[in-house]
């Protein structure tokens, strides 16, 4: 069945899926105020905190960051938006000891997510943590176990599970409008070229570099890593598959209701950005500029591809997932909404525009209110830690196969790679002292 676009959007409106205007801070000021701390007060952390403040149910008592300039800016913003005057910390352990927080929002680089989330949960807080849950699979498992043991609500920042066009697109898929779906292709393509190494240097005086590296190796500082650049350094993150990938891999799990693939193979490299450089004088990023990953499930195969050059000119879309079904091809996108291209070219395409919060095109407002509702009802939030864990595992398994250069068979029930000791060692990593790999 092809749903005419106008009717579809009307029915979406009727079910209240479209975003309303931003609730004002004052309108919601009678709600319970949770003592809230933001850990990692950079770009995305502040996007979340702004929505939390606007919802009117948190008192921002503390901010943490290892960059004092970031902290200062964030504190000023909080004061101007909410009137709260948060205390600022460079060491999360001190914040957690002193502040008796109800909620921790965690938006540090990925290699810090697990330690910070587990510490906050251990102190009794509910946690809103960014994707990917962990930098390695066993960190993510430890986060899930800690959340369950302490009976805390842990929401993962997979806002693409709650954004209106993703919800309506998923309904369209699950209602059978695309027919039987036999394969899915996930992709993120951009433009770029060769990468020149950047000089290593002393970290700026506002940045506690030792604490930034934390459990990761203390590598020489270079200006491209912070802020934001950590994504493309394997010490701190897992490149495009570990970043963008988690969102789109999650769409596949959401649609299929599968928990994990049984076989994974990934290949890639740096044919355009050039070989990774890392020496006493200079460094480049070290994640692949192009990569494919194949995920074999019981009844279908999904593929991932990214490219940081050439864009994706010949195709209509550069980001998202194509679901290929017997009735046509469905594209779930980001700013381009979703579109169904029927196999029968006489049928019209069906489309819904994206609806996001700005800046940065997200649905954190909805995810935040879902988080608070879950805390208050004791029910699981939409992007519960287990959902985040399974989506993160997909990306980390792809990276694991890429690093090993061979396919792996995943025993998702026991979270082990079948018959491959070298691969199983990569389910965790060595931590730099004094940090201890989480074992819960
Ligand atoms: N869900 C989404 O759509 C989405 C979008 C963007 C970013 N993210 C996630 O948000 C996280 C942050 O990304 P970003 O782009 O804001 O990065 P960023 O570099 O701008 O901010 C991270 C901040 O964390 C700070 N930090 C580092 N170590 C710390 C520590 N031990 N304690 C406290 N602060 C520490 C850094 O100094 C930096 O200011 C990442 O995990 C990223 O994947 C999610």
Image (cartoon, grey):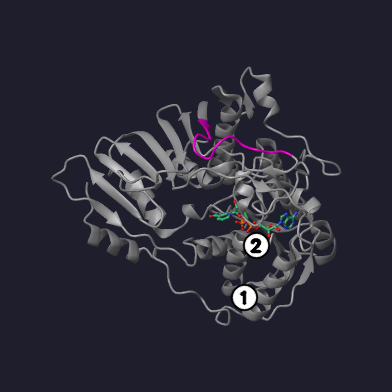
Residue highlighted by disc 2: 42
In depth, the one of 273 and 42 nearer the eye is 273
How packed mark 2 is, by other alpha carbons closer than 10 Å (few <14, some 14-19, many 20 or more), is many
Direction from residue 258 to residue 173 in the image, left or right: left
Q: Decide if residue 412 is in sight here.
A: no
Q: Is residue 229 above or below residue 256?
A: below
Which residue is located at x 46 percent, y 61 percent?
Answer: 361
The quadrant of the picture showing ligand 1 is bottom right
Residue highlighted by disc 1: 31
Q: Is residue 418 above or below residue 345?
A: above
Residue 133 is tagged as none
Quadrant position of the C terminus in the picture: top right
Q: Magenta region: which residues?
A: 268-279
Q: Is residue 80 magenta?
A: no
Q: Position of residue 25 (x, y in %)?
A: 58, 79
Which residue is located at x 72 percent, y 38 percent?
Answer: 279
Indicate which label's residue lies in the foreground, 1 or 2: 2
- How far apart, in angstroms, are the residues tagged by discs 1 and 2? 27 Å
Q: Main secondary structure of the magenta part?
A: loop
How packed mark 1 is, by other alpha carbons closer than 10 Å (few <14, some 14-19, many 20 or more), is few
Q: Is residue 242 above or below residue 294?
A: below
């Amino acid at each position: 069945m092809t749903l005419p676009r106008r009717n579809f959007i009307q029915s979406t409106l009727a079910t209240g899926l479209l975003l309303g205007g931003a609730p004002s801070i004052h309108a919601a000021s009678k709600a319970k105020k949770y003592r809230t701390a933001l850990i990692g007060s950079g770009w995305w952390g502040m996007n979340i905190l702004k929505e939390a403040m606007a919802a009117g149910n948190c008192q921002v008592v503390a901010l943490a960051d290892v960059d004092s300039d970031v902290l200062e800016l964030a504190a000023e913003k909080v004061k101007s938006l909410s009137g709260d005057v948060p205390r600022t910390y460079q060491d999360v352990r001190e914040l957690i000891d002193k502040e008796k927080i109800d909620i921790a929002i965690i938006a540090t680089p990925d290699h810090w997510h697990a330690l910070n989330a587990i510490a906050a949960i251990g102190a009794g807080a509910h946690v809103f943590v960014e994707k990917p849950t962990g930098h390695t699979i066993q960190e993510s498992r430890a986060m899930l176990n800690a959340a369950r043991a302490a009976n805390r609500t842990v929401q993962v920042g997979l806002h693409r599970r709650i954004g209106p066009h993703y919800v309506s697109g998923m309904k369209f898929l699950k209602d059978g409008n695309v027919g039987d779906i036999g394969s899915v292709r996930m992709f993120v393509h951009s433009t770029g070229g060769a990468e020149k190494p950047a000089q290593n240097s002393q970290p700026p005086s506002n940045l506690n570099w030792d604490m930034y590296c934390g459990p990761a190796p203390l590598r020489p500082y270079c200006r491209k890593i912070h802020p934001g650049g950590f994504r493309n350094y394997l010490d701190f993150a897992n490149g495009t598959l570990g970043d963008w990938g988690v969102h789109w891999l999650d769409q596949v799990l959401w649609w299929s209701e599968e928990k994990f693939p049984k076989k994974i193979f990934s290949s890639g490299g740096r044919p355009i950005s050039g070989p990774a450089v890392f020496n006493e004088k200079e460094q480049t990023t070290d994640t692949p500029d192009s990569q494919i990953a194949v995920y074999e499930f019981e009844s279908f195969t999904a593929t991932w591809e990214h490219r940081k050059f050439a864009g994706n000119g010949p195709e209509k879309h550069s980001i998202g997932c194509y679901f290929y079904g017997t009735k046509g091809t469905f594209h779930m996108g980001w700013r381009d909404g979703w579109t169904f291209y029927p196999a029968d070219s006489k049928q019209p395409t069906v489309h819904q525009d994206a609806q996001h919060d700005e800046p940065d095109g997200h649905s954190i407002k909805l995810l935040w209110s879902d988080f608070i509702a879950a805390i208050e009802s004791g029910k699981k939030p939409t992007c519960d830690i287990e959902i985040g864990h399974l989506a993160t595992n997909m990306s980390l398994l792809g990276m694991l196969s890429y690093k090993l250069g061979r396919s792996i068979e995943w025993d998702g029930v026991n979270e082990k790679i079948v018959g491959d000791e070298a691969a199983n060692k990569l389910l965790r990593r060595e931590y730099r002292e004094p940090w201890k790999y989480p074992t819960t």
